[in-house]
Image (spheres, grey):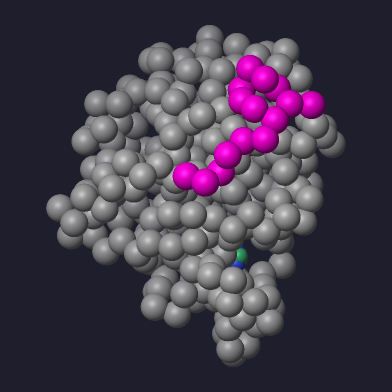
Amino acid sequence: MTDYFTLAQIDEVAQAVRVRLTTRPKVGVILGSGLGALAEAVESAAAIPYQDLPHWPRPTVEGHQGRLVNGKLEGQDVLVMQGRSHYYEGYSMAQVGLPVRVMRRLGIETLIVTNAAGAVNPDFRPGDLMLITDHLNLIGMAGLSPLRGPNLDEFGPRFPDMSQSYDRQLCALARQVAAEENLQLWEGVYVCLAGPSFETPADLRFLRSAGVDAVGMSTVPEVTVARHSGMRVLGVSGISNKANLDGNTITTHEEVLAAGNLIAPRLTALLRGVLRRF
Ligand code: HPA
């Protein structure tokens, strides 16, 4: 396991991606569990399998394709990660954060990050979308940060501010698109846990009392890396299941993937709308 990458290693990956790009992407998109469909909409797409890239963590779970897709989406030059890796797969936080650092070295300034999440907020239903307005970095509080190790000053400061992690203008744009396109868009706080076990009812009651609306196993490390290097971030959770606060429902990965089919068209409409109005 790699605890941290040097700038030279990050640039080695960036160069391996750069030589295969057909456009100069300014927007990076990370597609979560079962949400890979948006990548199919990219025009004049060039695909780069993760296995062709040095150091790049490869997804090991179903629902994550494992390739970069570069091309145009709604007139924007994008670099889409169709599938991501998680800490629970055995990767270090540095590995989980590596793709975002590579994006930054490629000149990407905006990160759109998506995930499948469990609803802690009782109003949310499977298939719903939630705009992430803030996150609870519980995994970071437990000592797992992708920024651990020597600070790379080329990216940002040792102690980065996280007070406005989710860009207010991009949030406003997402709200506007949702209103115009008649898409229901909840808002709330996302929490990242290490996983891979789902939460106990006691975990969930604790999270709810801490102000959490949606729970998952990703996103926060990537957003931390993005904010460290000054990228603007838009985050959207697709609600895949109702979290089990009462202890009477079982949560499965199959359920999460099946909900992806409900979420994907809505998420695609929202993100296309956002990119169109960028
Ligand atoms: N808990 C944690 N992560 C998840 C869930 C959940 O209920 N659903 C999708 N990812």
Q: Residue at x 22, y 35 (%)?
A: 276
Could you tell me if residue 14 is visible in this image? yes
Q: Residue at x 38, y 62 (%)?
A: 187
Quadrant of ligand 1: it is bottom right
Tell which of 187 and 249 is nearer to you. 187
Region of the chain picked out in magenta, as a range = 150-164
Q: Residue 135's x, y, as percent?
A: 54, 55
Q: Residue at x 62, y 35 (%)?
A: 160
Q: In this picture, is 120 found above or below 139?
A: below
Q: Is residue 135 magenta?
A: no
Quarter of the image where the N terminus is located = top right
Q: Is residue 159 magenta?
A: yes
Could you tell me if residue 57 is visible in this image? no
Q: Residue at x 26, y 53 (%)?
A: 175
Left or right: residue 7 compared with residue 46: right
Q: In this picture, is 127 found above or below 6?
A: below
Q: Residue 62's x, y, as percent?
A: 60, 53
Q: Residue 57's x, y, as percent?
A: 69, 35
Tell which of 189 and 253 is nearer to you. 189
Q: Quadrant of residue 55?
A: top right
